[in-house]
Image (spheres, helix red, strand yellow):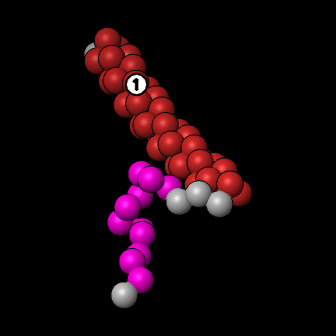
Amino acid sequence: MELAIVLGLVVLFFAIATLVVALEDRRAAHRRAVQRAARLARLGEVDPLAPSRLRTDR
């Protein structure tokens, strides 16, 4: 009985740790993207990785 409780807690701990790491990774990726866009904007450049945001003049 105690072994099942301990194993359940260990699995729960690893599941929560995995979730936290995944969320932090997404936040870090978003922060890098925002910083990259700001750096390119300061240089007056267009982001070459985001062609869907480009609009052509007609």
Instruction: Pick out the residue farthest to the top.
Output: 3
Q: Position of residue 15 (x, y in %)?
A: 37, 31
Q: Identify which residue, 58 or 4, lies in the foreground.
A: 58
The answer to whether residue 38 is visible is no
The answer to whether residue 10 is visible is yes
Instruction: Pick out the residue farthest to the right.
Output: 42
- Give the residue type at disc 1: Phe
Q: Is residue 41 left or right of residue 11?
A: right
Q: Is residue 29 left or right of residue 56?
A: right
Q: Residue at x 59, y 57 (%)?
A: 45
- The residue wearing badge 1 is 14
Q: Residue at x 50, y 56 (%)?
A: 47
Q: Identify which residue, 1 or 55, lies in the foreground.
A: 55
Is disc 1 placed on a helix, strand or loop? helix
Q: Residue at x 59, y 48 (%)?
A: 36
Q: Quadrant of the C terminus?
A: bottom left
* Magenta residues (range): 47-57
Q: Main secondary structure of the magenta part?
A: loop
Q: Identify which residue, 26 or 8, lies in the foreground.
A: 26
Residue 41, picture quadrant: bottom right
